[in-house]
Amino acid sequence: MASDRSRRRLFFTGVVGTLIIVTVYLSGGVVAGARSAAHAVVFPFSWAADFVARPVGHLVAGMVNYSDVEEQNKQLRYLLGRETLRADQNALAAQQLRQLSQALHVPVAATLGTLMAQVTAISPTNFSATVTIDKGQDEGVMDGMPVVADGGLVGRIIATSAHTSTLRLLSDVGSVVGATFSNAQASVLISGQGINNPLSVTGIPDTAPVGVGSLLSTDGLQGGLFPPGLPVGRVTKILVNPGASTYGVSLAPTANLNNLAYVDVVLWEPST
C-alpha cells in the first residue's frame, strides 16, 4: 500500500509539474503574441503620426526662419548693388579721367565716403516719391546729400531729424539731376515723371550722338547738386521732332527704385 501511495504521489507530482511547464510556455507565447498584435495595431498610427508631424515641424521651422532668410536676401541685394555701382563708377571715372585730362586738365574727384542706412518707410504717390531711412543728423546725414543703391543714384536727402532722414527718389516729379553722357560732350537735366514712369531728358543737342543703352551719370558741374560720376540711368527710347535742333530721350534708372531695402548716403555736400 505504501508503495502504491508513493507511486501515485510521484505520478501526481509529475503531472502537476508538466501542467505548470505547459502553462508557463503557453502564457509566454500568448504574451508575445499579444505584444506582436499590439505592435501591428499601433505601428500604422505611430507611422502616420510621424509622417504628419515631420512636415509640420519643417513648416514651422521654415516659418520661423523665413524672416531671417528674407533679411539676408535684402542684404545680399544691397551688397550686389554696391559692387555694381563701384564697377560702373570705376569704368566711368577712367574714361572721364582720360577725356578731362586731355581737354580741361580737371582732376577727377576722389572716391567719396558713404554711410549705409536701412529704408524704414516708403511713401510713393503719383506725384511724390519719397522714402524714410534710419540715419539722420546724429549720424552725419545732411540735407542735399546724394543717395545711391542697387548700382546707381536713387535720389537725394531733402529733410533730416536726429536719427531719420527723408529721401526724394529720382522718379519724384520734383527731382532734377544734372547729368552727362559717357562722352561728356553735353550736360543735360534729368527729370522725374512719377512712380513707374521713365525718367525724361529734353534739349539734347543733335551734335551729341546718343543711342539706346547709353549711360548717363551726374556731371558734377560747379554749384551742382551731385558729385561727378554717379550712374543715373540708361537710354530706353529716343524722341526726335523732325526739323528740331535738339531731341529728347527716356531713361530707365540704373537702380531699382521699387525694391529699396538698404541704401548708401554719399557724404558729400553740394556746397563743397
Image (tube, grey):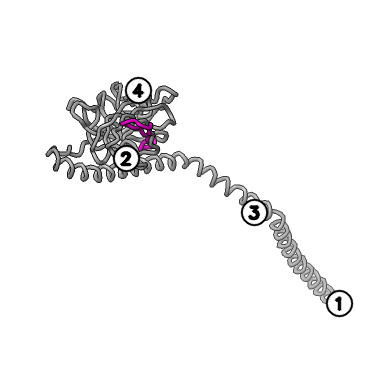
The kind of residue on which mark 2 rests is: Val
- Badge 3 marks a residue whose secondary structure is helix
- Badge 1 marks a residue whose secondary structure is helix
Q: Give residue 65's position: percent from left, percent from top.
A: 46, 42
Range drawn in magenta: 240-256
Q: Give residue 15's position: percent from left, percent from top.
A: 81, 71
Q: Which residue matches tag 1?
A: 4
Q: Which residue matches tag 3?
A: 47
Q: Is residue 137 visible?
A: no
Q: Is residue 256 left or right of residue 42?
A: left
What is the spatial separation of the Cα atoms under label 2 and label 4, in whole angstroms?
25 Å
Q: Is residue 60 left or right of residue 236?
A: right
Mark 3 / mark 2, whichever is N-terminal:
3
Q: Give residue 196's position: percent from left, percent from top.
A: 44, 31
Q: Residue at x 25, y 41 (%)?
A: 183
Q: Residue reaching furthest left? A: 105
Q: Quadrant of residue 110?
A: top left
Mark 1 / mark 4, whichever is N-terminal:
1
What is the spatial separation of the Cα atoms under label 3 and label 2, in whole angstroms?
69 Å
Of the numbered discs in the image, which one, if any, rests on residue 174? Answer: 4
Mark 2 / mark 4, whichever is N-terminal:
4
Q: Which residue matches tag 2?
A: 210
Quadrant where the C terminus sits is top left
Mark 1 / mark 3, whichever is N-terminal:
1
